[in-house]
Amino acid sequence: MPSAGIDVGLSIGLTDNCVRKEIMTTTTTTMFLATSTVAALALSGCQTPPAQLEVSGAWAKAADEGMTGVFAEISNPSNQSVTIVGGESEAANRIELHEVADGVMREKPEGFALAAQSTHVLEPGADHIMLMGLNGPLEPGETVSITLELDSGDTLEVVADVRDFAAANEEYVPGHGGEE
């Protein structure tokens, strides 16, 4: 019988330890989750809001078909750099970001980088946005809407006036210039 008493004592002791361990584990887990939640909420309030770009003078060259350019001044008044990495428009099958270097137009896959407190000018013969594979004519006096994609994942809505423009006689890198 004495061994039964010892076994019972040990069983009770182990059960008490297991209960204590379970209570401690549950308390520790609850405290960890509560602390993590508070920290996440506090940090979310500390995040820097996305840079707010400003667009002025946006216009697109009138075109009956194919492709056309879009031009504007885009300002970044924030204290953080932003890169325009792409875009889309219902007016075209796709948008490409282009540059003109040595009179040759080519896609600029790294996008347009806007340093903090700077302005980036998109103009004929330089950096510009191309609407490729127009879905219909763009007539003078109309507007065309474009959604630009930023490296942050945010977007920038641009509405450009469509104008007549007799220029933009750049040479094209193979794969551009009406070859769709």
Image (cartoon, rainbow, N blue to C red):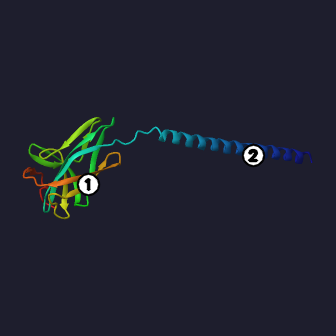
Residue 127 in percent (x, y) is at 17, 45
Number of marks in picture: 2
Q: Residue at x 23, y 45 (%)?
A: 56
Residue 111 in percent (x, y) is at 24, 45
Identity of the residue furthest to the right in this view: 1
Q: Which residue is mark 1?
A: 146
Residue 170 in percent (x, y) is at 8, 49
Residue 100 in percent (x, y) is at 13, 45
Foreground residue among 114 and 107: 114
Q: Residue at x 64, y 44 (%)?
A: 30
Foreground residue among 30 and 59: 59
Q: Residue at x 19, y 42 (%)?
A: 121
Q: Residue at x 20, y 64 (%)?
A: 135
155 horizontally vs 160: left or right? right
Asked if marks 2 and 1 touch (Cβ < 8 Å), the reply is: no
Q: Secondary structure at mark 1?
A: strand
Q: Which residue is mark 2?
A: 19
Q: Secondary structure at mark 2?
A: helix
Q: CA distance from mark 2 to mark 1?
A: 63 Å
Q: What's the residue type where badge 1 is placed?
A: Ile
33 horizontally vs 112: left or right? right
Residue 146, relative to residue 77: is it above or below? Answer: below
Dot 2 alpha-carbon crowd within 10 angstroms: few under 14, some 14 to 19, many 20 or more: few
Q: Earlier in the sequence, mark 2 or mark 1?
A: 2
Foreground residue among 42 and 111: 42
63 horizontally vs 81: left or right? left
Identity of the residue furthest to the front in this view: 141
Residue 16, relative to residue 134: is it above or below? Answer: above
